[in-house]
Every structure is written in C-alpha cells, then in structure tokens.
Image (cartoon, rainbow, N blue to C red):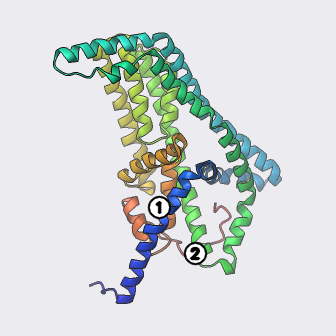
Amino acid sequence: MAAMPTPRQRKEEDGTMRNYLVVVPLVLALLHFASSVFMPLFFAFFLIAIAWPVQNALQRRLPKLVALLITLGLIVVVVVAIASSIAWGFGKLGQWLFLNAARFQAIYLDWTLWLEENGIAIAGPIADRFNVTWLVGMVQSALFRMNSMTGSAVLVFVYVMLGLLEVDDFNRRLRAPLAQPIGGKILAANREIGRKLRRFMLVRTAASVLTGFVVWIFALAAGLELAAAWGAIAFALNYIPFLGPFIATAFPTLFAIAQFEAWQMAIVVFGCLSLIQFIIGSYLEPLLTGASLAISPFAVVFAVFFWSFMWGIPGAFVGVPILIAVIAYCAQEPSSRWIAVLLSGKDVNLSGSTQGGNDARAV
C-alpha cells in the first residue's frame, strides 16, 4: 500500500503545480510573440539533432571544418528538395487554377441552386466571395508565405552551422562535475531526443516517398490532371502528421470535381486517397516505427494544431519533434514524469536518466 504524502510533500507538490500554471503560459506567450527569434532556433535544434551523427562520423576522419561543410551541404540538399516539391506542386496548381477557376465557380453555383431547390440556402456572403479572384488569391497567398520564409531559413542555417561546431564543447561542459546532476540528465535527455528524432524522420521520409509515389500512380490511373504535382504535394505534406495528409487528400478531391464535373468521381478520388493515407499512415508507419516512438495520438494532433497556431506552417512541421523533446525532458525529473507518461501513452524509459555518460554522440 502506498504511503500517504506528508503535509510537507503535499505543500511542495502544490507549489510545483502553481509554478507550472504561472511559468508555462508566460513561456508560451514569449514563444508566440518572439516567433521570429525562437522558431528558427527550434528548427536549428531539430536539424542539429538529425545531422549530428553525420558530422560526428565525418570529423573523425576529416578536418572539422571540412566535415562541417559536407554536413551543411547535405542539409541544404534535403531541405531544398522538400521545399522545392511544395513550391513546384502548388505552383502548378496555381497555374491550373488560374486557367480553370471558372469551372469551380460554375459548379459551385449549380450545387447552390440545387441545394436551394431542396430547401437548403447557403447563398449570400459565401457565393459573393467564391469567385476566380478569391481562389487564385488564396493560392498566391500560400506561395507568398512560403517565399517569406527565406529570411528565417538563412538564420536557421547560421544557427545550425554554429551549433554543430559547439556540440562537443557543450557536451563536455555538461559532463563537468560542477554541472551534475543536472548536466547528466540533460545529456541523457539529449541522447534520447536525438535517437527518437532520427528514427521519426527516417520512418517519416520513407512513408512520404511511398505516399508520393502511390498517389502519383493513382492520379495517373484515375486520369487526374497534374498527377506529378499531386505526388509531390503528398510527399511533402506527409511530414505534417494528420493535417498534411488531410490537405493532400482534400485538394485533389476538389480539383476532381472541376475536372470531371461529377460528384461520383470526386467520391472515388477521395475514398482511394483516404485509403492510401490510412494504410501507409496507420499501418506501415507504426509497423516501421515500433514501440520506441509511442506517443498519444491526441497529443500528436494537439501538437500539430497548437504549434501551427503559434508559428504557422513551420510550426506544423516541428510540432511533433517539440513534443518528443518535451516528453524526454519531463521524464528526467520525478516532479514532471507524470507529464511524460500522459503524453507518451506508455511507461517512459527512465534508463540513464541520472547518468550523463561519456557518449560523444549525445546531441
């Protein structure tokens, strides 16, 4: 039978909870209003965690600066490939939409008339707004937001370059006797975060490539225009859990309505794309990931939408990595371990939580 907490312990627990209630909202407000500073920093931490094993392996055989140059080149190639697939795919859609937006408006007006004849009135402000100019402006706005991220990308690159040079020295400082026991806990959490993030991105990349390929094949077989663009968009958006696959399914469905001018074909497109996303996202990805990344599905959805609210599109990409980091750090302290248990949906692995070790691979 568990021992009842003493009055002093209850007082300390109440004080800890009050601290959470005060500090967490203040930190979140700071992250939101200073997004231009913290968003690139979080992206840089994420990229450092992914790229550090490459940098560490190269600098054992090559001069440190040469290894850094190669690592940064690989990062740039991967990031540019993903960003280019998004920009190219939506650019193609924007061009197609400009030429065919009148179809959408005509179909929308036909459906509106049919609904009104059946006693469902949706005309008014929506009908006034749903026109060619609005549709084209929506796509142009999305492209403009992606282009505006260039300045942040430069800052991320600088952070990553300096961070990769600093990892060894930072780990040494954390292992110093004066930094214990906090330093050891940070090292243990960093190792866990790096391991999980690398596995997460490996599985997510494999699933994204497979999703993009299968969507492209399906689009060709179904006769959808811009099949390659749909594949590129499905590949890139699959890096955003839940929200990305939903967008990659909804957009082709809407375009199928305009292309085929039949709701039956739109249902077929929606059903097949949903099935593709379900099989890959709900079966293959968990099978490849295993139990090491078990996170509460509710926590994943909340993280994606919450960080999208905080930082927009970039926040949606880093929402799950931030969640993984929060779980790892909370697992190191008894007072916050309950948070890690709730978010992970399983008993957290506490091995090495109090030992920093001398592993040079720690991020």
Q: Amino acid at mark 1?
A: Pro
Q: Looking at the picture, how far across and down is residue 291, in whole percent? A: 41, 55
Badge 2 crowding class, 10 Å Cα cut-off, few under 14, some 14 to 19, many 20 or more, is some
The residue identified by callout 1 is 25
Q: Looking at the picture, how far across and down is residue 245, in whole percent? A: 42, 35
> Sequence order check: which comes first, mark 1 or mark 2?
1
In the displayed orientation, state which residue is furthest to the left.
119
Q: Amino acid at mark 2?
A: Gln
Q: Looking at the picture, how far across and down is residue 347, in whole percent? A: 38, 66
- How far apart are the alpha carbons under marks 1 and 2? 31 Å
Can you tell which quarter of the image residue 253 is in?
A: top left
Q: Is residue 98 visible?
A: yes
Q: Is residue 141 left or right of residue 253?
A: right
Residue 283 position (above or below residue 302)? above
Q: How many marks?
A: 2
Q: Secondary structure at mark 1?
A: helix
The residue identified by callout 2 is 355
Badge 1 crowding class, 10 Å Cα cut-off, few under 14, some 14 to 19, many 20 or more, is few
Q: Is residue 325 visible?
A: no
Residue depicted at x 44% and y 26%: 215
Residue 65 position (above or below residue 208)? below
Q: Looking at the picture, how far across and down is residue 275, in whole percent? A: 34, 31
Residue depicted at x 52% and y 27%: 232
- Quadrant where the C terminus lies? bottom right
Can you tell which quarter of the image residue 85 is in?
A: top right
- Quadrant where the N terminus lies? bottom left
Q: Secondary structure at mark 2?
A: loop
- Foreground of the two, 41 or 266: 41
